[in-house]
């Protein structure tokens, strides 16, 4: 829906539920506006339009999402040899600065590192033609909007701005009004589906005592037909403790949270994608935009403390899964993809339907 409008150069606000996949909605128009040597050879551009400075900028809230968007854009721009660079914290400055010196066409980055390099004049943003703010509501929740506004002040006034978000809180709407020019608001939703998650995700709420949660999660992990499982915790300490407890119970679990180094976080995600680890316990750093195939269960271990439930975002991996999936959490929701259920269990006092935990099973099937 966004492609015709974005390709025309108009500012766009794209709103779609988490899990529907918005990356190519802004990625293809963004790559199309970048001038590369192939365009000069084909006569579509003049030689003076070529530059080694970035021509497009994508701002994302988390390092994991930064890596994923970069890989998607590299794949989509492979035919035209578009140079895409990921810039995020937790990694050394020198390789990123050296890559900028050699020349890039598209920069995908997190607000903190982008602002650092722009302030040091290592990142030249004067030639940006297209700006994308991806998962803007998540950046609001993480407190990045002030940094985003500082980054926008480095950009030329004449540019295309595209803002993509699952929800549109007031601060995000205010950001759009200040920095976008007559944007077209495109909302992708089906008439018979008014929820905040995709239609193939069915959610339930369960209540459990804190001391019972590890046992409850262990029982959920013995569910018949379950595949990869993501467990979302509210704090870094809880995520690390739960991952250790699941390992002691014999489950192949890994952890992704802010106390881990970037290398350890990437290694855990890589092991999860490859199937070496089939239970990933994480905090909000993996709650948005992470695309992993084969996820059948998503568990919200604790009630979210933000005004917008984290479970809406963390249902995305199960919603994207092509196979039947179940996502459960000890906070308490369940999702159903296709004909099977995706369950989520939480201990919140939500007024949704309350179900009893599944029966104890002696062995995993």
Image: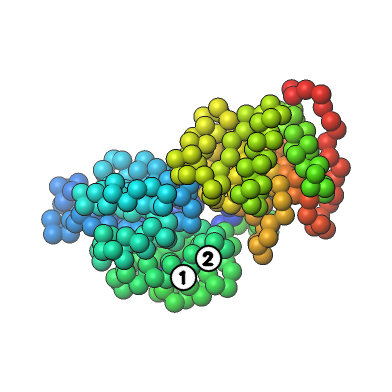
> Is 123 displayed left or right of 67 in the figure?
left
Camera-nearest residue between 38 and 207: 207
Instruction: Name above or below for residue 107 compared with residue 245.
Output: below
- At horizontal 84% and vertical 30% (from top left) the residue drawn is 360
Label 2 – label 1 distance at C-alpha = 7 Å
Q: Which residue is mark 2?
A: 143
Camera-nearest residue between 88 and 275: 88
Q: Which mark is residue 256?
A: none
Camera-nearest residue between 39 and 168: 168
Image quadrant assignment for residue 303? bottom right
Callout 2 crowding tier (Cα within 10 Å): few <14, some 14–19, many ≥20:
few
Instruction: Name above or below for residue 90 compared with residue 219.
Output: below
Instruction: Name above or below for residue 126 compared with residue 45.
Output: below
- At horizontal 19% and vertical 46% (from top left) the residue drawn is 38
- At horizontal 56% and vertical 47% (from top left) the residue drawn is 257
Dot 1: element = helix
Q: Position of residue 329 (x, y in %)?
A: 73, 44
Q: Which residue is mark 1?
A: 146
Q: How is the image coloured?
A: rainbow
> Is 78 displayed left or right of 363 in the figure?
left
Dot 2: element = loop
Disc 2 to disc 1: CB gap under 8 Å:
yes
Q: Is residue 117 visible?
A: yes
- In the image, farthest residue toward the left: 47
> Is 114 displayed left or right of 331 in the figure?
left
- At horizontal 32% and vertical 51% (from top left) the residue drawn is 93
Q: Position of residue 106 (x, y in %)?
A: 31, 53
Image quadrant assignment for residue 357? top right
Q: Position of residue 347 (x, y in %)?
A: 78, 50
């Amino acid at each position: 829906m966004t492609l015709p409008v974005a390709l025309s150069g108009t500012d766009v606000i794209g709103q779609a539920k988490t899990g529907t996949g918005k990356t190519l909605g802004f990625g293809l128009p963004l790559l199309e506006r970048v001038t590369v040597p192939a365009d000069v050879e084909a006569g579509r551009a003049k030689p003076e339009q070529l530059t080694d400075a970035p021509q497009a900028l994508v701002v994302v809230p988390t390092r994991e999402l930064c890596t994923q968007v970069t890989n998607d854009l590299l794949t989509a721009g492979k035919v035209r040899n578009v140079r895409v660079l990921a810039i995020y914290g937790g990694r050394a400055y020198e390789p990123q600065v050296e890559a900028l010196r050699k020349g890039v066409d598209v920069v995908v980055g997190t607000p903190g590192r982008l602002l650092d390099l722009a302030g040091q004049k290592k990142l030249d943003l004067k030639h940006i033609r297209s700006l994308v703010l991806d998962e803007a509501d998540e950046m609001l929740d993480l407190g990045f909007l002030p940094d985003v506004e500082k980054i926008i002040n480095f950009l030329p006034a004449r540019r295309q701005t595209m803002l993509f978000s699952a929800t549109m809180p007031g601060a995000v709407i205010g950001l759009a009004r200040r920095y976008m020019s007559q944007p077209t608001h495109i909302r992708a939703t089906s008439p018979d589906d008014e929820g905040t998650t995709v239609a193939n995700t069915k959610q339930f709420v369960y209540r459990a005592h804190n001391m019972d949660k590890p046992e409850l999660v262990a029982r959920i992990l013995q569910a018949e037909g379950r595949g990869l499982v993501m467990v979302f915790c509210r704090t870094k300490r809880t995520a690390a403790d739960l991952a250790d407890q699941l390992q002691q119970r014999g489950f192949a679990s890994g952890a992704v949270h802010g106390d881990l180094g970037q290398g350890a976080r990437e290694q855990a995600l890589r092991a999860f994608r490859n199937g070496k680890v089939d239970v990933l316990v994480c905090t909000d750093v993996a709650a948005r935009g992470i695309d992993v195939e084969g996820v059948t269960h998503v568990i919200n271990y604790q009630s979210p403390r933000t005004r917008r439930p984290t479970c809406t975002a963390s249902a995305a991996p199960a919603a994207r899964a092509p196979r039947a999936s179940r996502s459960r959490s000890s906070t308490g929701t369940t999702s159903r993809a296709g004909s099977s259920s995706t369950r989520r269990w939480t201990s919140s006092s939500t007024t949704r339907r309350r179900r009893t935990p599944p029966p104890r099973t002696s062995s995993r099937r």
